[in-house]
Every structure is written in structure tokens, then in C-alpha cells.
Amino acid sequence: MTMTTMTIVDPTLPPLERGPVPAALKRFIWDIQSMVELADSEREILVIGRDLMARLVASDDWLPETFAIASPGGGAQFQLYSDGLERFTVVSTILSGGAGLLIERPSIWEIRGVLRGAVVEEPCDAHAKGAGRSLPPRSVETRASGKGDRLRLSNALPDQLSISIHVYGGEIGKLSRRALKQDGQAEEQPLGYANGENAPPYDILTIQTEIRD
């Protein structure tokens, strides 16, 4: 696996531009779109999607830097792909050293892979059994649709960036996802996508170029 080093971007510098869609992400999006269109059931989506995600996170050199910007002591989510029909969305979650996000997950299916670092997943339900789980690089998790819940995603590493990639079975941009303060309390305002003006999500027009295997 190719490892890359990500630094915190100086906010006084000009914002990074998105650039063309990386080949690995383009292939992944096309495959996810075909899967969503052709799958006979949600179970089939999760089974096939797990394999597609495992292939994507096996390499750590494709994520554009503008979608992997760390905020000191904090976390952020960037929308990587916006489906015009809102059948799914692809998101990157960026956690600086020791940071966390409190995510209010919708009642739709999800496929998540850890691209870099290590992420701790902890249910916020007081009745949930067991402690948090640490997910290493290249690990992949799936979640079927059902009742929504709240999940705490934290960086298991105190001094390194951790990144996970998510595919949700719908557009989650308007749903509430809250950042955590240093004391572990949730911010009052919902966390929106962190995309800047120079880095909108990719869409069907930006990926309509030839794919070569």
C-alpha cells in the first residue's frame, strides 16, 4: 500500500482546487452507480459494495488533497460525489490527531472503509453494549438501513491524520452531523460539508470520460 503524508493546510494560503477526478475514484463511482441501478436487493448492494470499497481503500494515494484537509483538533466531512438522482453519495471523513465527530446517521444503508490511520467507532446509545471498536486501515464495514442512530467516530491516533470513506444510500447533506469539541461535547450547529468553492463534489458530468482498466 502506498502511504502519503498529509499536512494541515495554512488557511492564509489560496484554497486548493479540486482537479480532475482520480482514476481510482472514477472507477469506484461508476461501479457503485451500476450496482445501485442493477442490484436486486439491499443485501446485494452491501455485499458487492463491500468488495468495491475494499478495492478503493487498498491504495492510499488517490484522494485529492483538497478533500483531505485537517482542521487542528477537529474533524470534517467532504462530499466527493453527488448523484443527481440522490440515490447515493460518497463522502470522506477527515479526523486530525485525537479528534472526533458525532454523526447522526440516517436510516439508510452505508458502506465505510478506512483509508488512512485508525478510526474508533463508538455507539452513543446508552443501551448499546460493548466498548468502541478500533478500525485499522483497509478495514470495511457495512450497515443495513433501519432505525437511525448516533455514532461517535474518533481518531485513534493522537498525532496523525485518519481518513474514512463512506457511501450512503441517499443524499445526507441536509441531515444533522455534529462536530465534537475538545471536551467531547457536541457543537450546537450541525456540521455541513466542508467543500469550498474551488472544490465542489464530482458529478456525472465530471466523470463522463473514458475509463481504462
Image: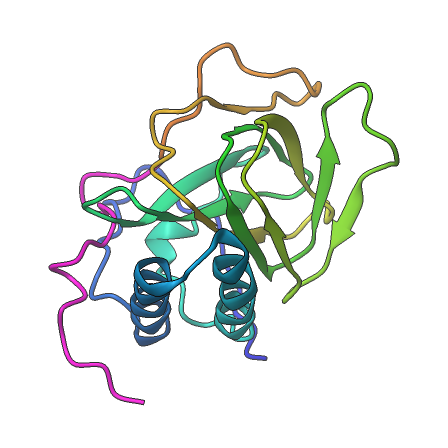
Seen at 64% across and 52% down, the residue is 160
Seen at 45% across and 13% down, the residue is 189
Q: Main secondary structure of the magenta part?
A: loop
Is residue 43 shown left or right of residue 39? right
Seen at 59% across and 28% down, the residue is 147
Is residue 31 shown left or right of residue 73? left
Residue 205 colored in magenta in the image: yes
Front-most of 180 and 53?
A: 53
For the C terminus, the quadrant is bottom left
Seen at 57% across and 58% down, the residue is 113
Indicate the position of residue 104 as horizontal and vertical percent values: 54, 25
Front-most of 37 and 161?
A: 37
Indicate the position of residue 20 as horizontal and vertical percent values: 20, 66
Q: Quadrant of residue 124?
A: top right
In this view, which residue lies farthest toward the right? Answer: 130
Is residue 42 shown left or right of residue 155? left
The image shows a total of numbered marks equal to 0
Indicate the position of residue 10 as horizontal and vertical percent values: 38, 43
In this view, which residue lies farthest toward the front? Answer: 40
The answer to whether residue 208 is above or below residue 73 is below
The answer to whether residue 74 is above or below residue 166 is above
The answer to whether residue 200 is above or below residue 31 is above
Indicate the position of residue 185 as horizontal and vertical percent values: 66, 15
Q: Quadrant of residue 33?
A: bottom left
For the N terminus, the quadrant is bottom right
Q: Residues in magenta?
A: 194-213
